[in-house]
Amino acid sequence: MASCSVSAFSVYRSLTAENGLSVQTDGHSNKTSQEKQKRSLRLSRRNRIIKRKRKYLKVKTESSLDIHVVNNAEILQRTNDYAEKEPMGHRAKRKINGKRVHKIKKLKVKPRKATALSSDVPTSCSTVKSATTSKAGFPTKPFQTKDSRPWTGPSLSILLRDLRHIQNSKERSIKLFEWLIAPVAPKRFFSDIWEKTPALIRRHNGSYYKGLFSSEDFDRILREDHVNFGVNLDVTSYFDGEKETHTPTGRALPVVVWDFYKNGCSLRLLNPQVFSGTVWNVLSILQESFGSMVGANVYLTPPGNQGFAPHFDDIEAFVIQLEGRKSWRVYDPRSNEEILPGVSSRNFTQQEMGPPIMDTVLEAGDMLYFPRGFTHQATCTSEVHSLHLTLSTFQRNTWGDLLRKLFPGTLDLAIEDDVEFREGLPLDYLEYMGVQNSEREDDPRRESFNKRIYNLMRKLLKYAPIDAAVDQKAKDFIHDCLPPVLTKEELACTVYSAPARWRDGGPRNIVLQIRGSTRVRMLRSNVARLCGEDGSILLYYTIENSRDYHKEEEKCIEIDPELADGVELLLCSYPQYIKVDSLPAGNLDDKISLAAALYEKGLLMTEYPLLPKRD
């Protein structure tokens, strides 16, 4: 059946005729009147449509912390309801629905503090709590990726191969971290998740972390390397709410270790970077991003067993599931004292645990992150063993730890410079101060004493040697760091590929030609740190550190004050190469001597391999 189309203006003409109003049909004034009437009717109808759209696209604020989001399905249902009540032409519907979609897209951009940190649009009307709670300051709901499609990405071997071609070690680190937490973007991770809430990243790809570490690597290490109980390997079990440690002394031989495993014990390999070149490479690259040591432990658990009691740690943890499956439960901090704690907790009992905020099963290729202070426990599922590697970082790397470095030096400077800090205490201050006198609030001497202390503390601020305190933190970081893993290209341009050798009864090729035109740079962004201590200028470096944590003492060389500016320029100009003769370090011989000393320590690399001087 053909549908008849009736214009708004024809309706208006009929209405005016019925009311006995005269309608002019010719003349300029008649046309102008008709156009105004048409425009008025169109605007009136348009306003009604806009009001309806606003009404049904409304975002209702339920409280200052809760947001009610009206989703796509609800909007479409309301659209259909109104289409039945008031039929419209196809073009009008298409136009209005297009604007609705535009408004829906705007609604998807939710305020960061009022989201559940979900990467997907809700499929039903939901209420999302604010990311800020009254006490803990953590989101009430952990982050979790919801895409069910497999996430592929490059393999670790291909990624490490490609990273060799990136000159800047910090950019190299950023690329590796992007791969580690993909598909979550690093910017979003550090703004919405880091130190705030646990995050579960599912990939539905069991081979995503293939090549990082495996149970075969675990077995090879036991057979080929010298692994000691208590130093490199822990054996634990958890039955009936009690954790037990079964760690003998001496070397951990395979027959003994695998017997513990067969009897339900969990194995923890400490510092796997000592035995695995791949783990060492990954950790040494990542530490450039965090400005803090990155460590690791490997956990191998038999099916249906648990190795550790519920506890929280003093590190930021990235749990990488390598093989099998493991069930994890994560709990919110129970008090303000447990938020970002400086020390790890004791072992808790099950009775002390409340309801978990996350109860999930990690499968190979998945990653779980949780900040320090979040209590957690894990049980291997009954079907298959579990192998996971935990990356840890940011231990004792807080503002409070920096202030611990700052305050002693601040007080020493203030006492030395200001006589007020050296004046004696009142003769009778013990009579009205101290815990035993704390109830004497009406004693004016207490108020005067406290006021004097507050004034002195305010004066301390101008003496705070902040840069010196930061250098002390950096010195600790340099000592904690792993030595860098050099690529083939880097090896060819450093002292480690120097052609010096014994030949024909004597050493040959021991003199390398460093000239004023030689272009050089530091080996890594954080390979060294210039610090001033007790009137001396010291350059601390990582290149000679051990792969085993703090096995070696901190390494440094003293820098002549006249050459310090040259070292500072090398550190600050990284990753750019600069000519030796452009160093602000005395005459040309001094510049060449400085470059040669740093090169021989392995801290400096040249743009191209150096040629030996002919004997």
Image (cartoon, rainbow, N blue to C red):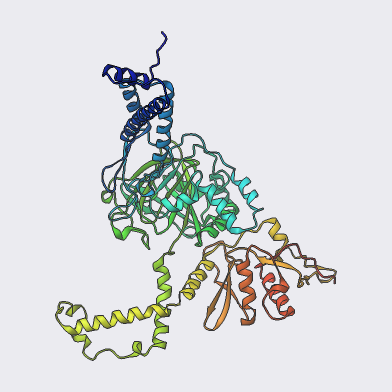
Q: Residue at x 41, y 51 (%)?
A: 192
Residue 175 in the image, given as x and y percentages of width and height: 57, 51
In depth, the one of 9 and 89 nearer the eye is 9
Furthest-front residue in this view: 27
Question: Where, by quadrant of the figure, is residue 360 drawn?
Answer: top left
Q: Residue at x 67, y 66 (%)?
A: 521
Is residue 275 something that shows in the picture? no
Q: Is residue 498 above or below residue 15?
A: below
In depth, the one of 63 and 538 nearer the eye is 63
Q: Residue at x 45, y 74 (%)?
A: 466
Residue 205 in the image, given as x and y percentages of width and height: 52, 37
Question: Where, by quadrant of the figure, is residue 402 drawn?
Answer: bottom left
Give the position of the N terminus as an image quadrant. top left
Question: Where, by quadrant of the figure, is residue 8 drawn?
Answer: top left
- Total residue callouts: 0
With 358 as the anchor, is 553 left or right in this view? right
Give the position of the C terminus as an image quadrant. bottom right
In depth, the one of 46 and 576 nearer the eye is 46
Residue 195 in the image, given as x and y percentages of width and height: 40, 55
Is residue 319 something that shows in the picture? yes
Q: Is residue 92 above or below residue 118?
A: above
Residue 278 in the image, given as x and y percentages of width and height: 59, 52
